[in-house]
Amino acid sequence: MDRMRLMETFVRVVETGNFSAVAREARTTQSAISKQVQALEALVGAPLLVRSSRSHSLTEAGQLYYERCRQVLDTLEEAHIEVRRTEHEVGGVLRVAAPAAFGRLHIVPRLREFYARYPRLKLDLQLDDGFTDLVTAGIDVAFRVGELKDSRLVARRIGTAHRATLASPAYLEAHGEPQHPDELAQHNCLIYTGLATLNEWNYRDAEERPHAIRVDGNFQSNSSEAIRQATCEGLGISYSPLWTFGEDLRAGRVRAILTRYRPPSLPLNVVFQPARRPSLKVNSFVNYFSEAFSRDPDIAQMLTADPDTADAATDALPGSRLRR
């Protein structure tokens, strides 16, 4: 069997995490896939995987060889695309991961125009507020909101997500509007469990003095979509990125409150596997959405790192009441 085929099999075993998944993809047996990896190990003269009854892991040599194989395969794929390419002929399957609300609100609505520009490109979009391991899931590019924890990833920062404290008019009418972050202790706060600080909400006032507030409430979720809906339904107060509530703010379903106190902003990055340099299809995807976001009033706020501009954006939100 040719070396390239063995390399492709090995890479897929690493990325899927098991032999049976690769066997299903190749419509063959798990034993046949195992023999291909063994043949590759014999060819390179070193063990690539440490096998156990339930899982396997890469040896040091295997990690190095995986990274080199991934680079070779990506280069070959790009070469095939380059041969036939024009801007409208970028093709292949692109696997993208993003937080659920971000994907629903800011990726899917732009796909019609995206496909008009790149009709040969197929997207496999994975939406999940939880952590997605790019290697295990075989993801080409992922959107990450917040500080990056995995230093192995290659990141490109494309913006900044400004956050706000939000509540529905119905909730505020029934329970009153807090004037200071300390007053949140007397309110039902909706806890997003994906937040790094969980039930501690942080603010800075106009003099840049920090305020760290412990909050509590009768509802929490790992879904930003669920937190958004609960806020709109008047169940409590949330602490969320502004872009999650763009249409809700404009429609008056929620209001920004405590606008005198600014939550810390979050970076928005696109990340890639370390063994991969961005391919033509990845660059086409990222460049398209970067350009589209720069024209969107909700996302354009994310492209501003200047705190004064961030404040101005919050001041302009429907229902916000800035008190200096």
Image (spheres, rainbow, N blue to C red):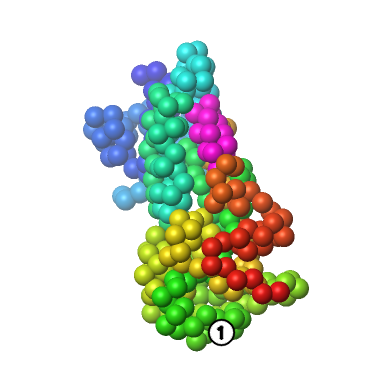
> In this rendering, is residue 47 above or below 205?
above
Can you say which quadrant of the picture contains the N terminus?
Answer: top left
> In this rendering, is residue 95 above or below 73?
below
The kind of residue on which mark 1 rests is Glu
The structure residue drawn at horizontal position 57% and vertical position 37%, both measured from the top left corner, is 291
Q: Circle 1 sits on which residue?
A: 183
Residue with the most extreme right position: 207
Q: Is residue 138 visible?
A: no
The structure residue drawn at horizontal position 60% and vertical position 71%, both measured from the top left corner, is 321
Q: Main secondary structure of the magenta part?
A: helix
Image coordinates of residue 286 in percent, x first then y, are 54, 36
Question: SS of the residue at dot 1?
Answer: helix
Residue with the most extreme top position: 83
Q: How many numbered discs?
A: 1
> In this rendering, is residue 183 above or below 64?
below
Image coordinates of residue 47 in percent, x first then y, are 46, 37
The structure residue drawn at horizontal position 63% and vertical position 58%, both measured from the top left corner, is 313
In the picture, residue 278 is in which quadrant? Answer: top right
> In this rendering, is residue 30 above or below 54?
above
Image coordinates of residue 233 in percent, x first then y, are 36, 70
Depth order, front residue of 307/278: 307
Image coordinates of residue 123 in percent, x first then y, are 39, 35
The structure residue drawn at horizontal position 67% and vertical position 62%, both measured from the top left corner, is 311
**Magenta residue span:** 279-293
